[in-house]
Image: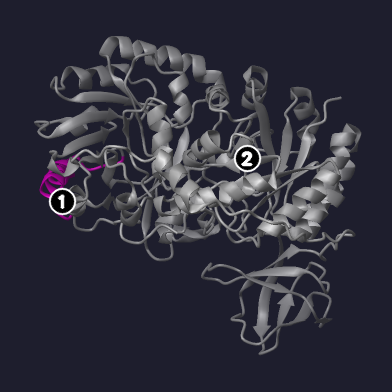
Amino acid sequence: MFKPELLLPAGNVENFVAALEGGADAVYFGLQNFNARARARNFSFNEAASAIAFAHSKNKKVYITLNTVVKNTETLELIKTVDIISQLKPDAVIVQDFGTINLIRNFYPQLVIHASTQMGFHNVSGTKFLKKNGVKRVILSRELTMKEIEFCSKHSEIELEIFVHGALCYSFSGKCLFSSYYGGFSANRGKCAQVCRREFISQNQNITPFSLKDYQLIDFIPKFSELKINSLKVEGRLKNSDYVFSVAKAYRMVIDNHSKIEEAKEILKTDFSRPKMQWFAGRNLKNPVSELSGTGIFAGEILNVNSNFFDLRSSQNMEVGYQLRIRSADDKEGILIKINKLSKISDVVFRLFIDKGLSLKPGDKVYISAGKVYKPVTKLKILNKKINLISNQRLKLINDKFKQKTQIKTNEKKSEIFIRVSQVEQLQNYNFKGIKAIIFSPRKLNVDEEFLKICRNLPGNVAIYFEIPSFISSVKENYWKKKLLEIYRKTGCGFSLSNISQIEIIPQKSLFLANENIYLFNDIAIDFIRKSGFKEYIYPFENDYPNLITGKYKSGIVPVYFYPELFYSRQPIKLKDYFADFEKRNFRKYIRHNFTVICPEKPVSITHNIQKLKEKGFYKFLIDLKYENSHQNIKSIFTSALKSQKIEGADIFNFKREIK
């Protein structure tokens, strides 16, 4: 019987040991920077060295996460970090940024690369692209169906890893901008503010439409063994050692003996997480959304508060050592407390003693987020490993390798405007003055006639690109490959790629650009995609002005008007088209290619900064009308862009504030 690797998370040293004692074959953790769980304690270099040495002595593996996007100002720090990791000799590094792949592939080829789920690879084309670029394993997007996982397993030539247990984001892997939109706390940089767990207002009701139940796929381990999935991964670097140990124990039990599924599920009932579901890789449950936004088992609401205790009505049993999460009625970030002392007032009322100064009030919701903490038997001895710091000369040599060698005087160039539309009507009554290219992003898949109509009416000096959807199921790849070839033969168009692996399905010799979903936050990443054949590329929507101007490459397309896709989800929700948050910001729901898309009602516009950007060397700009509902506004949007004027009532996203 093929046994997949069991891979557990560790947010600290204690959890690392708990994972191994629970039966993990491998453990993944992050260092102090460039990891997608910035709120975890994470590991120092010496702790990482000690953990790797200990794991290897037990024939276990360690993977280090470098799974965030990297800003231009951070590339020197990235090089230093990768250089040290190469001395630690982990079994692999888990990466998100194309710049990190580029750096490792060119200067640290001894490091094994695993592509993070944050990269959004979800089909066979993705696995082919990664294999060509030196990646050993892909962590597939968490949203795949069993049929899609099975297809990838049969047709891929690299290792496959899938998530089987833990929290689920509402948005598709790596494509959440909501947290960044709220305050610059980017989910792509490990700073997620968990917007999907918050309450929103729809039809005068407070609801949590995006708070998905947790994943639990222990029932499908026999199937994953049959498919020879290389690694089964558990989410939870922010969880405690009790969670890590008990989940490892349960999954170890079933990997070793498929007949023990029900026994293992009894263990998992004590992991104090949200209700469980199997929607993506298993059964299509009718209600995948948790009615409660908080993590853990709902315990009750606070009855009253004193300076050093509060009374809680709860049907759950309370014990010293439990960890509680308390959320206020206004849905702010929860307060974590540990029960150190309690007394029982009645059968259902407990008095819990607390430190003074905690801001609690009657009505606050209380959740049991963890039981008594598991204390590992083994104590990890922290080694004092000698780390050789990279020399300034080598640091500069590596960094300069990826910089543009000749600078074009772009400030002397005329502006080139790229327009993205989703309907032919959005181009009516416009003379195309100053337009470099049109990007057509279809609302529906059967668009041949509409696209041909646009192509027939374009002047010869305006390029046309057909935009490919972000998600293409493995079982539909051949259909899309034929469709794109047919479109190309009829129109000679270029293609706007939403995932870098779509290079594998577009016609040979066609032009192609990288849209904003192929994250390019630094020069090393841009160097990677230029060498992959991209002539044009759009900077990410959540980018900021300081990061833009720090880069050496100035020939990218700067988005100056757009509606960001805050959530892009495979999960349908019962929600009206319009809804709001508690700050009275309004949002809209769209359905695109069977995906649910959430956008702000207000557009993002930095058209008034175009002249400022031109002075810094940028000359290509994107006006994105994909979600523009009012055709009457289009002419004024163009005018504002051409004259570098402000559009009143628009948002500026992260342009001024730095993305965190």
Check if residue 595 falls in the magenta segment: no
> What type of secondary structure mainly makes up the magenta span?
helix
Residue ID at (79%, 67%)? 316
Q: Amino acid at mark 1?
A: Gln
The residue lying toward the viewer, choosing from 395 and 350, is 395
Pointer 2 or 1: first along the chain: 2
Q: Which residue is mark 1?
A: 611
Under circle 1, the secondary element is: helix
Do residues under tags 2 and 1 come within 8 Å of each other at their CB atoms?
no
In the image, the segment drawn in magenta is 627-646
x, y (%) of residue 8? 74, 47
* Residue 451 spot, x, y in % from top left: 27, 21
Q: Quadrant of residue 344?
A: bottom right
Q: Which residue is mark 2?
A: 286
Q: Is residue 109 left or right of residue 529?
A: right
Q: In the image, is residue 127 above or below residue 215?
A: above
Q: Residue 615, percent across and down? A: 17, 51
Q: Is residue 414 visible?
A: yes
The kind of residue on which mark 2 rests is Lys
Q: Quadrant of the C terminus?
A: bottom left
The residue lying toward the viewer, choosing from 476 and 653, is: 653
Q: What residue do we see at 31% from left, 9% from top?
A: 489
Please state the horizontal and vertical placement of residue 646, each as a whole percent of the image: 17, 55
